[in-house]
Image (spheres, rainbow, N blue to C red):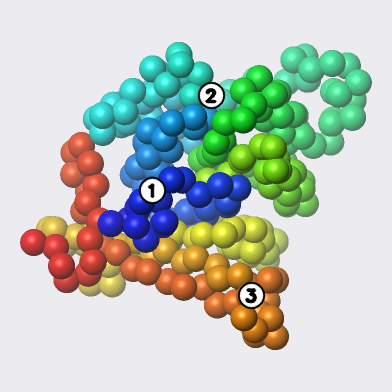
Amino acid sequence: MLDDVLGWGGTLPRNRVLLVKDTVAASASFLLLYLLKKILATPDSLVIFVGLKEPFSHYSRIARKQGCNLAMHQDHGSLVYIDLLSKTILEHSSLPTDAAVINEGNKLILLFQKFIRILKEQPGRNTWIIIDDISLIEVIAQGNNAHVRDFLHYCRTLATDQQICSLLLLTHLDAYEDIDETMMANHLELLSDTVINVVPLVTGQAVDVHGQVIVEHKVPCNVNPNTCMDGFQNSRGYGLHYKLMENTVQFFTPGKHV
């Protein structure tokens, strides 16, 4: 049912930005793995997974329970995992001297350059860059939100007529408390084509319902541009309940689960 709401019932969307938001009270980790599995199951897909929160073994273990072998996808070249827990991937020693000097102030540019190299090695694929989670990317930028915004803008420009590239970003609302961080959260919203909010039930967790996902699609201003902001009018929202199980997750219309 979530696939239909997202518009993933047939083929995957192309050149889109999907933002997944959660809180401590309702983690979206299950949703990230669910979407990752869907993308990898699509022919000619390529996933560049940037892990800042957990090691690869964590994602691999959970995905295997859901019938998805991430190690196999790595071997076949459909999954490239970039481990940023160690930060070694961003060391200047791995880059030419001139690049190291140019990018001394913004290590995120080094990460972006790695994206470019991967895309050149595997051209023509339906590529998804997944970042878990985007709030931790600010640590690499040493708290410089401007660098994070530039990085996201550069990632968005990877999508061209010749190259299919979408972004899947996970962020935690609890991470944004002060004014600068709130501005960053707003920027993520503006950047996104679709926003998925994972939230707890108002009445608390039930036996058959563990929470809800609210999907908002931005609607292009094709009818009345005067009513729009930033090229979009009010989002269309769809709400689904979900139940987590050991090997899968079920999505259903509120009140319809048996």
The disc at residue 173 is none
Residue 164 quadrant: top right
Residue 106 lies in quadrant: top right
Q: Earlier in the sequence, mark 3 or mark 2?
A: 2
Which residue position holds label 2? 80
Residue that badge 1 annotates:
10
Question: Which amino acid is tagged 1?
Answer: Gly
Q: Is residue 152 left or right of residue 167?
A: right
As measured in the structure, the alpha-carbon distance from the residue carrying label 3 to the one carrying label 2 is 36 Å
Residue at the image point whose x is 42% and y is 71% from the top: 237
Q: Secondary structure at mark 2?
A: strand
Q: Secondary structure at mark 1?
A: loop
Q: Residue 27's x, y, as percent? A: 37, 51
User: Does the CB distance between marks 1 and 2 fall below 8 Å?
Assistant: no
Left or right relative to 65: residue 122: right
Quarter of the rendering occupied by the N terminus: bottom left
Mark drawn on residue 221:
3
- Note whether residue 135 is visible: no
User: x%, y% of residue 190?
Assistant: 64, 64
